[in-house]
Image: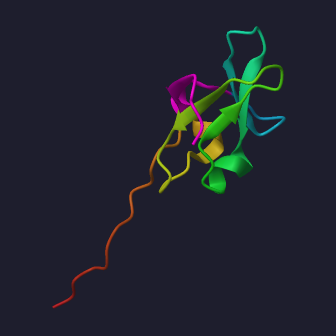
Amino acid sequence: MSAFHDEVELEDFEYDEDTCAYYFPCPCGDRFVITEEDLENGEEVATCPSCSLIIKVIYDKVTPPPGGGRGGGPQKVEGPRGEE
């Protein structure tokens, strides 16, 4: 099991629409990165490409953030209508 440098909520990451990736500042000066595809596959570890640090990403795995987590949120699902 890996030792995480920190645990960070996905909403604290910066989303880049061009790369479909989330970024968070790393102490080394670079940025941790995790992609939308990683999140869709259940990944919860963001890595820094410049050093060995990793962080755990906290997010709702059941309802992934639509549109990069900006202005979406879980959508209301209505149940079946009861007819008499």
Percent across and percent down for residue 62 are: 47, 57
Vertical position of residue 78 compared to residue 18: above or below:
below
**Residue stretch in magenta:** 1-14
Q: Is residue 60 magenta?
A: no
Q: Position of residue 19 (x, y in %)?
A: 83, 36
In front here: 42 or 54? 54
**Quarter where residue 5 is shown:** top right
Type of colouring: rainbow
Q: Quadrant of residue 41?
A: bottom right
Dividing the image into 4 quarters, which one contains the C terminus? bottom left
Identify the residue at image location x=39%, y=57%: 76
Q: Residue 23 in the image: state x and y as whole percent.
A: 70, 26
Out of 39 and 53, give the one closest to the viewer: 53
- Residue 27's spot in the image, x, y percent? 68, 9
Residue 13 drawn in magenta: yes
52 over 73 or under it: above or below: above
Can you say whether 24 is above or below 43 in the image? Answer: above
Locate residue 63 relative to residue 47 in the image: left or right.
Answer: left
Which residue: 31% across, 79% down?
A: 80
Residue in the foreground of this view, choosing between 8 and 14: 8
